[in-house]
Amino acid sequence: DIVMTQSPDSLAVSLGEGATINCKSSENILYSSDKKNYLAWYQQKPGQPPKLLIYLASTRETGVPDRFIGSGSGTDFTLSISSLQAEDVAIYYCQQYYNTPLTFGQGTRVEIK
Amino acid sequence: QVQLVQSGAEVKKPGASVRVSCKASGYTFTGHYMHWVRQAPGQGLEWMGGIKPNSGDTNYAQKFQGRVTMTRDTSISTAYMDLSRLTSDDTAVYYCARDRTNTWYGGLDWWGQGTPVSVSS
């Protein structure tokens, strides 16, 4: 199974400041035939199901604010929040869908400092 | 508007089985793969498997092989997840989630509200 490891486990950021979450996969999840990274990012708020933010490592889902930016390739990926808003307080998960079983990172909790 | 509406909370005894349903609306049910993901209390997300609604083909995580069965009824746009031989470790919220594509490699773009399943003697 592909293991997804996120860092840090939690971070506290001042409103308006940037936040960066890292995600590392135990195997390359760049598909050679289409040169796409099969990685997604989700946001989960308390009591709610996860919400898809980013797919193919850097493509924002419809309606997701442009302060959420996904980057990276191969085994190392990053989710950046350019200017943290109060509504961004949540747990963020990366997930690979390069191979089954689909696997998620352990999550990163983002809070307001 | 895409909606995935799941069945209600369940309380089960160890050794029992549970069925969770997921009724889809607002899109062509057979056009998108359906996943099942669970989340134990205070824990992360765990993929259980999925089903291709147009063919019924399934793909289960090894961990659940032999205990999980995923089916669908295309006439009522509903997917089902059956889990047998429950233990307390199966206490979790169970989600159905639609894939962006008709395969399992697209990302999960719409999620059901979740079905809490509690297993206790």
Image (spheres, grey):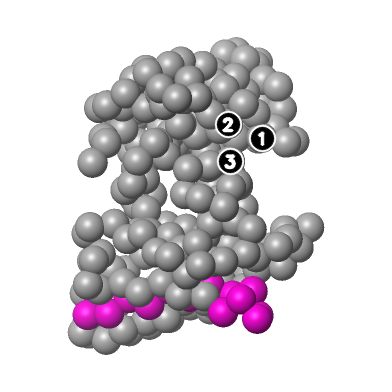
Q: Secondary structure at mark 1?
A: loop
- Of labels 1 and 2, earlier in sequence is 2
The part of the chain drawn in magenta is B73-86
Name the amino acid, label 3. Answer: Leu
Q: Which residue is mark 2?
A: A54
Q: Chain of mark 1?
A: A
Q: Which residue is mark 3?
A: A52
Residue B57's x, y, as percent?
Answer: 43, 65
Residue B30's x, y, as percent?
Answer: 62, 64
- Is there a contact, CB below 8 Å, between mark 1 and mark 2? yes
Is A94 in front, or is B104? B104
Magenta region includes residue A60:
no
In the displayed structure image, the side of residue B20 where residue B65 appears, left or right: left
Q: Secondary structure at mark 2?
A: strand
- Is there a contact, CB below 8 Å, between mark 3 and mark 2? yes
Q: Is B105 placed above or below A60 here?
A: below
Q: Quadrant of residue B41?
A: bottom left
- Is there a contact, CB below 8 Å, between mark 1 and mark 3? yes
- Image point 70% across, 32% down: which residue? A64
- Image point 39% across, 64% down: which residue? B58
Q: Which residue is mark 1?
A: A61
